[in-house]
Amino acid sequence: MVFIILMLLLGWTQSQGCQPYGIRLFLGHYFSYLRNSQDVIRIVFNTEQECRGQFVLELMDGKTDKQLMTSQITYYDTQLLNMTQIYEKNQTTHYNYETFIHTFKIGLNNLDVNVSTSYNYTIVSRQNSILSGPYKFDIPLAQNEQKMLVFGDMDSNWVYNYSKDTFNWLENQVKSDKRYDTIIFTGDMAYDLESHNCKQGDNWLRNISVFTNRYPFMATPGNHDNGNNTFYDFFRANFGALFLKEYNTQHYLNDFFSFDVGMVHFISFNPIKAVYHNDVNNITHLIVEQMRNDLIQANYNREKVPWIIVYTHYPIYCSAPNSDQCLNNFNYLSAFEDLFVQYNVDLYLSGHVHTYQRNKPYYKNNIAQYSQKDNIISKYQYPVSIIEGIAGTDYGEQNETFPEKPFIEIQNPNHGVGIITIKNSTHLYYEHITVADNKVIDSIWINRSIDINNKSKHDGFEIVMWVIFSILMVITGVSIYFKSNQGKKNKNKLLDDTIKMVVS
């Protein structure tokens, strides 16, 4: 009897240790410049024990309910995040935490996107029939319209329930089956991911799955995500998106990635070393050059993917009192600003400051050229910049309004999220919603049908062509004149010679 009880307890313990948690979606390298068709959607989850090779993914076509064979459509991998080992030689910090991270990669070869872009999935254990799901995801391929959620600076501690309204709003979006092609997260999770022996981050994983099991979660890292050793170990293992390993160095850990969603090219970058003045290894220039090369390619591809949106944790123009970054980020990030103007970036998203704030187009700490009629912005020299740092956190002051500055168009301190809607190749709609009452408190249209940079280049080209045309016309006229005069001279000479011959 004791043996049976022990076996039951052992089986229950193993069952609990292999229960999936923190289920989250990511866009795979099919959406990066690698265009890997075997890495379209990643389904990632954690377990307390290894449970290697135990899970299968049941996938159903969202329209036909046809079940697809898991073994034919997925690449499955398990990795250990052992924070105990990572910090074992650290002089000041020690952890006793490990988690196992499982990843399914779903490829295009078994997804018939011509029939359906919606799929239902369930995670199943071969050993003990543990079920997680069913859940749903959509393939964000090019359509007539795309939608993306934008928010950041959020925890799930709920000590003061500051983020609970945002969680509830997001959960309602899932229950209502609202479609969003991805979540753009502007950094700072859990406050902090590695706090309390990493339980803060573990708790975050368990809670966010109410919306990350439905919408791909593409996060840029914030200063509260970097960990005690500043290597982003917890973040990169659990949320490392499309970082490219070939760019890794000891001091530069892929603080840059980009991907396409329909008509939008997204660029994420992490300039933490520049804004905190600790770039002792001079890596910021690597990020600048990566962005330059990426923007060159993005502009070549602009007819197919017309919009360019850059997002990071750090705003360039903000007004938090006594903030060195709000005073000087336009200096610290000036090399990036120059690229935004040179390559016609449309929108710049950030967090860090716990507010919603939309700025006028500003460049080098001065107003940049743009046109605005009602809430329609066009002919902009510099991207429209928006701070979405108000998803709710127990850290810092709440519902705080910051000093007004010339660059601020509107700010609102109430917890909320942003929604980007790409209507077509020339019109983008942005709205900010306060989650407690589901009200739109700010909205703008961005119209890129008239690009002052392209227009000026076009006008310059036309001027040059007119000059060349005028010169050619003058040359042609002169040539005709001389030929005409020469013809008259020849004719007169011939007539004189004929008269002389007749007289003779």
Image (cartoon, helix red, strand yellow):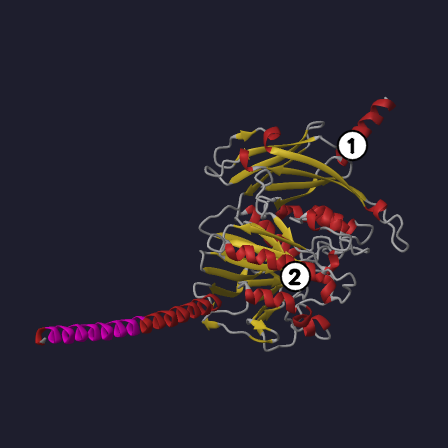
Q: Nearer the viewer, residue 414 or 477?
A: 477
Q: Amino acid at mark 2?
A: Val
Quadrant containing the C terminus is bottom left
Q: Residue furthest right?
A: 91
Q: Which mark is residue 40?
A: none
Is residue 79 a member of the stretch shown in magenta?
Answer: no
Picture coordinates of residue 480, whole percent (x, y): 26, 71
Q: Is residue 427 left or right of residue 120?
A: left
- Identify the main secondary structure in magenta: helix
**Which residue is the site of mark 2?**
288
Query: Quick one: SS at disc 2?
Result: helix
Dot 2 and dot 1 residues touching (CB under 8 Å): no
Identify the residue at image location x=62%, y=75%. 365
Residue 270 visible from this viewpoint: no
Magenta region: 476-501
Query: Looking at the picture, how far across and down is residue 353, in whole percent?
Result: 67, 66
Spot the residue most to the front: 504
Tell me the quarter of the picture where residue 341 sits.
bottom right
User: Against 316, is 16 above or below?
Assistant: above
Identity of the amino acid at label 1? Gln
Mark 1 lies on a secondary structure that is: helix
Q: Is residue 475 left or right of residue 13?
A: left
Quarter holding residue 432: bottom right
The residue indicated by pointer 1 is: 14
